[in-house]
Image (cartoon, grey):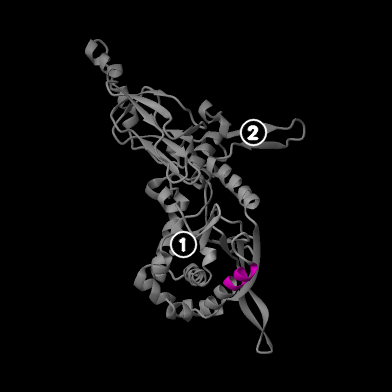
Amino acid sequence: MTIKITVPELGESVVEATVGEWHKREGERVAVGDVLVELETDKVDLEVSAETAGVLARIFHQQGADVQIGDVLAEIERNGEAATAEKPAQDETPAPAPAEKPAEEPRRAVTPVAQRVAAAEGVDVSKVEGSGAHGRVTRQDVEKHLQKQEAAPAKPQPQPVAAPSSQVSAESGNGRTEERIRMSRRRRTIAQRLVEAQHTAAMLTTFNDVDMGAVMELRKRRGPAFLERHGVKLGFMSFFVKAAVGALKAFPKLNAEIDGEEMVLKQYYDIGMAVGAEEGLVVPVIRDADRLSFAAIEQAIRDFSARARDGSLTLEDLRGGTFTITNGGVFGSMLSTPILNPPQVGILGLHRIDERPVARNGEVVIRPMMYLALSYDHRLVDGREAVQFLARVKELIEEPETLLLEG
């Protein structure tokens, strides 16, 4: 009996995927739950597992192919034991169980980027030590492995199925080289949506600065006790999440979206946190942020950051969101103009903290200052509202006890 393996439902608004690494080959035995192939989507990578035992009879779409929901990826022959069971039945040359070879050791999870880098560099990922969750091999692990093999012989050519991912060509004579790497589906989608955001929204950005001294002093006083009690550090982001929610309640159009000729004002606060991941930017969502404590927000941020690094975020983690915060300051950015995350109409950009001279009560003093940037869709949000929103965030950060008093 033949069982078809199809592209599953991929989540909200996701209808297409790119075939990643196949973990089984045609003719191999598979057990229920064995991971057959990885699919790259706009948001996360998914693993497609075998729902029945048998033999992987045929693969219809190789690595790099674009597929849609319902497309047949492969077929499993439930009675496929015949391909291997015929040999013992003949009693002549019973093979020493070569069909069990795939089960010699557990499959090691490898991120798609790591797989492509390994294929391009001729690295056997089974020999790479994984640092991700459950031993998952990341791009950094492959790069560290390569550094340890400086004296290794020439790299073998990647297998044909991985050929679309990387190609190196050398200019004759002067030794200059170019590397051509196929963009991942997520990277392509990010590029497309960023361009669409600028073409479809009347996007403007307003700026302000904020004195971080009060928050830094509060963290210094309460940080150790907070860590001991909750098992997580008291960071800056929980203050900005709380401040953003407070400002959104005061200026609800920034927590809305445009649907045709209507505006949808949302009475809940799902705050997206932009996180740099191996495949590109992802925006996991802290749901009902207005109902969460500082500790719960910090725990959510820590969890999202870890799972973004090892590629274990789910579609549910990334679904929806009413407003986004992005922190370029962790990379050293002094000032930037963040791009909207449609259909949201507002995004708050944070930047690095610098000690700068400022005027206080007629005197020049040195204070830890941060620039804030708010990009907004002018079709729905007026400049006055945007400026007042950012001023409210500034006020709440500079007087953080207000966040506690106002909940």
| Residue 266 marker | 1
Front one among 105 and 369: 369
**Residue found at the very far bottom of the displayed protein:** 362
State left or right for residue 94 relative to residue 322.
left
| Residue 168 marker | 2
Which three-letter amino acid code belongs to the residue tagged 2? Val
Q: Quadrant of residue 167?
A: top right
Residue 89 percent across, percent down from the top left: 22, 13
Mark 1 packing: few (<14 Cα in 10 Å), some, or many (20+)? some
* Membership of 60 in magenta stretch: no
Which three-letter amino acid code belongs to the residue tagged 1? Lys
Quadrant for the N terminus, please: top left
Task: Please identify, in this view, whether the residue under mark 1 or under mark 2 is nearer the observer.
Answer: 1
Q: Quadrant of residue 169?
A: top right
SS class, disc 2? strand
Residue 301 percent across, percent down from the top left: 44, 61
- Magenta span covers which residues? 383-389
Residue 405 percent across, percent down from the top left: 43, 81
| Marks 1 and 2 close (CB-CB < 8 Å) | no
Kindly tell me whether residue 143 is visible in this rendering: yes
Residue 54 percent across, percent down from the top left: 29, 25
Magenta: main secondary structure equals: helix
